[in-house]
Image (tube, rainbow, N blue to C red):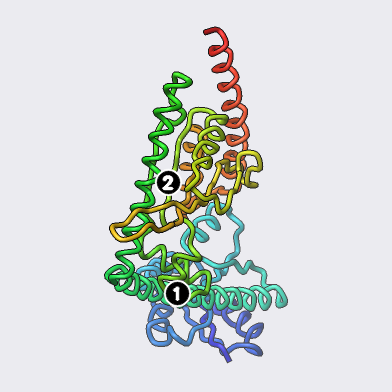
């Protein structure tokens, strides 16, 4: 039987609670706070719950709670307050201190039994869940360490280093093509089609994790065949029609091969994300051969890029409250951005027609 400690300076209250609970629990009793703390020191691990009176001479219920908090016992033993009053401020203070529930006088057998049983069960479930989370966190941490070590080993492999060099070359190749198109476009239309180009090479750890998520062996061939965004470029344009015009000019080059297109501008994601994604096969000219290497190019307007940056922060922050409300606001902003982009484009067209 589980052990319960009943602490009250009134013997009648102690005896009444023992009669109610002794068929289901082993009931220990203490007549004051000092005795309660002594019994907790002796049998803390065996105590399933503490029923505690607040108003006792010398060491009262609040003193007991304070000592329990200082020793970390509140994490292991749920506390139910024995109370003859219904003062809201007292109950609020107790709950803030970590008290689990209240048992009000006069005692009703069924209510006392149910509150004690429910409190113990909920407390045990909470502790089991916390331990499960701790085990899972430890396992994830260990897995992260293993992935980090293996990713570091991968990054030092000669074949991997050569592959990363090829992806860097692909980035430079696409950047060069886009800069040439920018110059030609500027000459023809008297303005630049894009504001900036951002590029990034996927880190070894991210590559390793992506293959693990896909349940694929970590091999050079799987990196080349199964990951399309190791080499990534983001092209920031002023207007939506510049995105499509620039993408069309890039794809017209006879040695650039389009492998896949995802148009999230015409068909946005449910969260409001808008961007044009192209997976390309790009020629890379090495000292001894010409190879084709995959690269992902994303085209966005300035406003789309600003929105995506904010949404990314929300996605990877774990301690944000009201995420559903923020997601709704972001979706509304994405719709406003789309309208604004096309309004600005219309104004630009009117200005161009006046020239």
Residue situated in front as seen by the camera: 142 or 255: 255
Q: Badge 2: how crowded within 10 Å, few (<14), some, or many (20+)?
A: many
Q: Is residue 213 left or right of residue 336?
A: left
Query: What residue would you read off at disc 1?
Result: 134
* Secondary element at image label 2: strand
Residue shown at 65%/47% (left/top)? 270
Residue that appears at 53% across and 38% down: 247
Residue 9: tell me if it is visible. no
Q: Which is more toward the observer, 336 or 217?
A: 217
Instruction: Please give the label number shown on residue 233.
Output: 2
| Location of residue 181 in the rendering, given as x and y in whole percent from the top left corner | 43, 33
Q: Position of residue 169 (x, y in %)?
A: 34, 52
Residue at 49% in and 66% down: 225
Q: Quadrant of residue 143?
A: bottom left
Q: Is residue 229 above or below residue 347?
A: below
In-front residue for pair 231/108 = 231
Q: Secondary structure at mark 1?
A: helix
Number of residues whose C-alpha sits closer than 10 Å to that of mark 1, classed few (under 14), some (14–19) or many (20 or more): few
Q: Position of residue 177 (x, y in %)?
A: 40, 40
Of 185 and 24, the residue lying toward us: 185
Residue 142 on image: x %, y %:
38, 76
Gap in Å between the C-alphas at discs 1 and 2? 39 Å
Can you tell which mark lies on residue 299? none
The quarter of the displayed image where residue 148 is located: bottom left
Q: Residue at x 56, y 21 (%)?
A: 344
């Amino acid at each position: 039987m589980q052990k319960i400690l009943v602490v009250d300076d009134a013997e009648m209250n102690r005896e009444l609670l023992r009669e109610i609970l002794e068929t289901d629990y082993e009931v220990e009793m203490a007549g004051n706070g000092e005795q309660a703390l002594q019994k907790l020191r002796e049998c803390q691990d065996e105590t399933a719950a503490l029923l505690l009176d607040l108003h006792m001479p010398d060491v009262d219920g609040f003193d007991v709670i304070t000592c329990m908090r200082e020793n970390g016992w509140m994490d292991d033993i749920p506390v139910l307050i024995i109370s003859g009053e219904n003062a809201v401020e007292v109950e609020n203070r107790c709950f803030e201190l970590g008290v689990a529930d209240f048992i009000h006088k006069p005692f009703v057998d069924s209510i006392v039994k149910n509150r004690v049983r429910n409190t113990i069960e909920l407390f045990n479930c909470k502790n089991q869940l916390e331990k499960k989370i701790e085990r899972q966190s430890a396992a994830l941490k260990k897995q992260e360490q293993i992935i980090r070590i293996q990713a570091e080993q991968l990054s030092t492999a000669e074949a991997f280093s050569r592959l990363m060099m090829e992806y860097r070359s692909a980035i430079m190749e696409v950047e060069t093509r886009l800069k040439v198109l920018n110059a030609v476009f500027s000459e023809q239309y008297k303005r630049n089609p894009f504001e900036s180009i951002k590029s990034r090479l996927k880190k070894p750890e991210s590559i390793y994790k992506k293959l693990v998520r896909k349940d694929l062996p970590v091999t050079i061939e799987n990196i080349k065949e199964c990951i399309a965004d190791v080499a990534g470029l983001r092209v920031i344009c002023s207007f939506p029609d510049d995105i499509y015009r620039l993408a069309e000019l890039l794809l017209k080059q006879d040695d650039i091969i389009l492998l896949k297109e995802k148009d999230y501008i015409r068909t946005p994601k449910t969260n409001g994300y808008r961007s044009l994604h192209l997976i390309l096969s790009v020629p890379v000219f090495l000292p001894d051969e010409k190879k084709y290497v995959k690269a992902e190019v994303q085209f966005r307007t300035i406003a789309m890029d600003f929105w995506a940056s904010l949404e990314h922060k929300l996605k990877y922050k774990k301690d944000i409250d009201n995420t559903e409300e923020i997601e709704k606001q972001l979706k509304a902003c994405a719709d406003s951005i789309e309208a604004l982009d096309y309004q600005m484009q219309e104004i630009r067209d009117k200005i161009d027609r006046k020239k």
